[in-house]
Amino acid sequence: MGQPVVHWEIAGKDAVKLQEFYSGIFDWKVNVDEALNYGIVETRGQGGIDGGIFAPPNGAAPYTMFYVHVDDIQKYLYKIESLGGKTMMPPREIPGVGSAAVFSDPDGNSVGLFTGETVS
């Protein structure tokens, strides 16, 4: 069995507007963590995986990303780079949750890696 997708993110200029948009379409419950400025979306109870909707820091461009759970981020980054991918964000700790990194595939698509609790 392959590594599971455990989290997704939608980042855009107006987080509140995006949270209302997706909540209105899909009836998603969004809990905003004010300290992180991050809207945590709960879909797991409906058979999905949880995610987040937020405004990226420093005026970064909007994006959508998913995160794959792995046991050792650096091991996977070495494998990714050996197969033509590129590390975009090295492993970074998420206090109380785990660690994450971002890579790009050979076509430039960004994908996240995550290790830690598989709770979004």
Image (cartoon, helix red, strand yellow):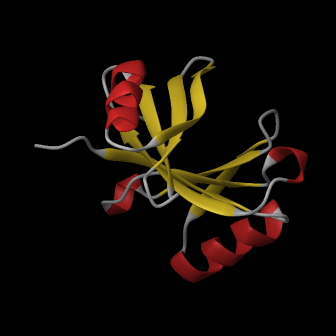
* Left/right of residue 41 with respect to residue 44 in the rendered view: right
Q: Identify the residue shown where x is 53% and y is 23%.
A: 97
- Expressed as whole percent of the image width and height from the top left, the position of residue 120 reads 49, 40
Query: How many numbered marks appear?
Result: 0
Looking at the picture, tell me which residue is in the foreground, 60 or 97. Answer: 60
Residue that protrudes farthest toward the bottom in the picture: 25
Q: Identify the residue shown where x is 66% and y is 61%.
A: 63
- Expressed as whole percent of the image width and height from the top left, the position of residue 102 reads 54, 39
Q: Identify the residue shown where x is 89% and y is 53%.
A: 59
Q: Measured along the vertical axis of the image, is residue 98 above or below residue 16?
A: above
* Left/right of residue 101 with respect to residue 40 in the rendered view: left
Q: Is residue 118 visible?
A: no
* Left/right of residue 104 with respect to residue 118 in the rendered view: right
Q: Measured along the vertical axis of the image, is residue 3 above or below residue 50?
A: above
Looking at the picture, tell me which residue is in the foreground, 32 or 109. Answer: 109
- Expressed as whole percent of the image width and height from the top left, the position of residue 108 reads 52, 57
Q: Is residue 95 visible?
A: yes
Q: Identify the residue shown where x is 80% and y is 71%.
A: 17
Residue that protrudes farthest toward the left in the picture: 1
Looking at the picture, tell me which residue is in the foreground, 89 or 81. Answer: 81
Q: Measured along the vertical axis of the image, is residue 95 above or below residue 102?
A: above
Considering the image in quadrants, where does the N terminus appear?
top left
- Expressed as whole percent of the image width and height from the top left, the position of residue 25 reads 58, 82
